[in-house]
Amino acid sequence: MGDPNRQAHGAKDSRGSPAGGARASASALACWLVLAAFVPARVVAPVVPGMTWWSLDLHRFLTPAWAWIPWLFAAAALIPAVSSRLVRPLSAYGEALARGGAAGFLTATVPPVLAVVLLPDRTFFLGDFQLRQSTLGSPSAAVPFWYPYCLPLDLFLHDTLGRFLIHRFDLIDNDVGRLLGAIEAGLLGALAARFVRALGARGAFAALVWAGIAFSGVLTLYTGYNKAFTEMVVIAVAAGAFTLEIAAGRASLWPLAIAVTIALFLHRSAVGLLPGFAVAAWLAGSDAAPTSRERLRALAPALLPIAALAIIGPRIAGIVRRTDAMHFAPADVKQLGLLAATLAPARLIDLANLLILLSPIAIVAIAAMAANPRALKPDRGLVALGTLAAPMLIAALFLHPSQGLWRDWDTFAAPAAMLSMLAAWALCRGFGGSTRFEWLAAAALVGCTAPTIQWLAHSADRDRGLRRVEALIAGPPVRAVHERASAWEFLGLRRGDLGDAAGAAEAFAHEAELEPSPQVLRHWAVMEAGRGDFEHAIEIYRGLVARYPGDAQGWFELALLLARSGDTVAARDAASQALRLDPSRRDWRAFLESLGPAAPR
């Protein structure tokens, strides 16, 4: 697979017989029809009520220029006469990627870096974006409380290093994620180019493979998101490239071993890379000279991940036991059953949305395989790459993130990158050695990358981004209670950060209707007080302590508001109740004494 001459020869063979040419043409037609179907879908979905197809209705939340100019490019590229004119520049671009060197490195790294730098995320809705950013400003002693599930390298990159950069260079919290994101976007582009070379892709198909990985929806992770999933995508692509090089007999096991070792100290999902690493190690050992010494030398790199697993494995096992049950078997999944919940129609639609967002090249490849399955003959490269990807893809199928797939899609980014690499293999195996179908590669490149540019532009538009969150909550479909509650909490915190106390209070009021926890009620009351409605804030606090009479903090904060409103008698009663619940608080006792002696009753 890694030999471009062999790949080209296979393509010529398929065209050499009428049946082979007909199958290749049918496969190309299937790819074109899939790309063509997305053009009207992106026009119809925004005018259909609800947010069922949230990966297709983005035009509703974009400026006209961002909505229609990329769409027009994707539509025009479907015309063979137009896409044929793109073949020459895209072929030159792909050849630069395939050759490597300094020019190839710049060709691979500059576009993704520019994209994420020029279009940073200003909405902050994705996953733990807001939490990860805000905790950089909290005391470092609170880190174990916020991130009990984090591994050492994740904490170092996204907390220790982040705090150092903030204090050393006078950065703000958002700068840390953006700086790391720009660097890692460049690495993603460079490693995608290495995958191109490992695959042996050339010309316009080389450009398509690179764009299908580096400019898929995962690129939007690198616009400020300060979490280990960004590095896991980079490592996934690196592992794919190194695995193909090993399968082709052109590389040792060392690069893959180093990548897997780093991943094990970064995120627990790296355990999924171990079966693929074992297959790559077996291939490396079988390709070594038939002496015990040479085989041991070829397999020596395997000691790195083994040692890493011995060190960090118990920590990973503990995190999985404590944390991952809520991701794979939350309450609603337990109620329905794992298989029924996983295959529920609404979830399957959300998984389709994820596929459209994160790996559009996979949809094109699926169409090609369905139309011409005989072109896809498994080889060492596919076996190794498939084994590497399979654990992550299977785990992703059964993953039920607490905030919903429409928000916590960051957990699916590394599996999506694996899927994109498999899709690239399939397309290059079917068409890559033929110049006859390079127009299709051009059309697919434009059709797959235009939506990514739109997603970047959307996340950079804060106001439209927040309106989309409100639309997602409103539905239909009606999302799970916790998913809606967490989205309302996000809106409350985000609008509060932006100085919109009224909008924040409204969001927390909606959250309180769904999940009236002490924290939610407290947030709501604080925002009501922030907008000057102290009576409503006091009413909320009275409801809080009535519902949760053992909440000492709630009683004391009620006392503060009562004192501020001039009702010292009620404030004294509330502060006394807080002290009865927590007598150790000297500051509360001092506040009670500041209210003066109690009047005779």
Image (cartoon, helix red, strand yellow):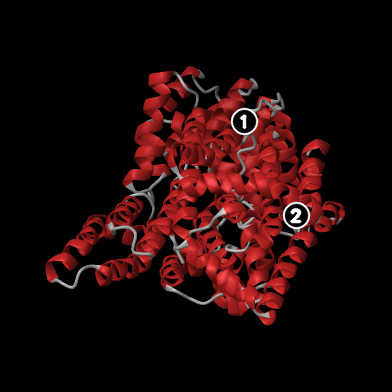
On the image, which quarter does residue 430 sit in?
A: bottom right
426 above or below 181?
A: below
Q: Residue at left 63%, top 76%? A: 16
Relative placement, left or right, of 432 versus 311 is right
- Is residue 173 visible in the rendered image? The answer is yes
175 above or below 8?
A: above
Relative placement, left or right, of 357 versus 251 is right
Which sits in the foreground, 390 or 442?
442
Relative placement, left or right, of 191 versus 369 is left
Which sits in the foreground, 577 or 398?
398
Residue at the extreme left: 293
Q: Residue at left 42%, top 43%? A: 146
Q: Which residue is mark 2?
A: 56
- SS at mark 2 in the image: loop
Q: Residue at left 44%, top 18%? A: 170
Q: Which residue is mark 1?
A: 118
From mark 1 to mark 2, how far is it between C-alphas? 23 Å
Relative placement, left or right, of 13 versus 314 is right
On the image, which quarter does residue 288 sit in?
A: bottom left
- Is residue 326 visible in the rendered image? The answer is no
Task: Give the residue type at disc 2.
Answer: Leu
180 above or below 46?
A: above
Q: Give residue 549's position: percent from left, percent from top.
A: 53, 46
Foreground tag (1 vs 2): 1
Identify the image quadrant of the C terminus.
Answer: top right
Q: Identify the disc placed on residue 53.
A: none
Q: Give residue 444's position: percent from left, percent from top.
A: 69, 56
Q: Give residue 370's position: percent from left, percent from top.
A: 66, 76
Q: Give residue 175's position: percent from left, percent from top.
A: 51, 28
